[in-house]
Amino acid sequence: MSLDVSPTLLALAERDEVADADFLAIVRTSLPYAYRLVNDLTAELALTEAEFADNTVAPSEAERAQLLRALASDSIRGALERHFSVKLAFQNCHRLAVFHPHAEHTATYREFTSPRAQLMNQSPELRDC
């Protein structure tokens, strides 16, 4: 299970009354590594003139699992993108990049998310991640 949902929030969801802030609070507490990584990369991006900030350090297995769960969910990924006002891109099992909003129209984003870039970022150490 990806998220630790309280009975109160589940009841709100059943009535279609879940606010983004409530959903993000659950994401932050249930997937702290993933949330923190997006937060840290967003802060890093804000301090530079770069088109993106990315993580190239492989995390622990538990952290990797959190990141995979967060990015495999459209609702979680979308909530993170809206909250941090960024566009996320993902390679391998740990290389998360944070781009400026609407970056999907840039050559840099298209290159980062291209099949070529995916293939070039493979290694035997990441085979089972």
Image (tube, grey):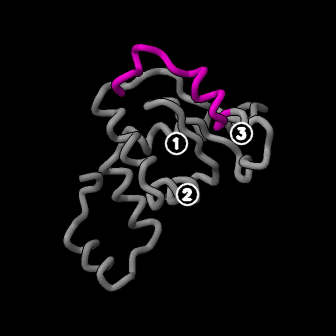
Residue bearing the label numbered 2? 83
Sequence-wise first label, 2 or 3? 2
Q: Residue at x 42, y 41 (%)?
A: 34
Which three-letter amino acid code belongs to the residue tagged 1?
Asn
Q: Please, is residue 128 above or below residue 36 in the view?
A: above
Q: Residue at x 63, y 33 (%)?
A: 115
Q: Are marks 2 and 3 in contact (CB under 8 Å)?
A: no
The quadrant of the rendering that contains the C terminus is: top left
Mark in the foreground, 2 or 3:
3
How far is mark 2 from mark 1, CA to CA?
Answer: 10 Å
Q: Which mark is residue 63?
A: none
Is 121 included in the stretch rendered in magenta? yes
Question: Residue 105 in the image: x percent, y percent?
Answer: 78, 49
Q: Which element type, helix, strand or loop, lies under badge 3?
A: helix
Mark 3 and mark 1 in contact? Answer it, CB < 8 Å.
no
Q: Residues within 10 Å of mark 2 (few under 14, many from 20)?
A: few
Q: Residue at x 25, y 63 (%)?
A: 5
Number of residue marks:
3
Q: Which residue is mark 3?
A: 109
Q: Earlier in the sequence, mark 2 or mark 1?
A: 1
Q: Amino acid at mark 3?
A: Tyr
Quadrant of residue 19 in the image?
Answer: bottom left
Q: Amino acid at mark 2?
A: His
Q: Quadrant of residue 26?
A: bottom left
From this viewpoint, which residue is outermost toward the bottom?
A: 15
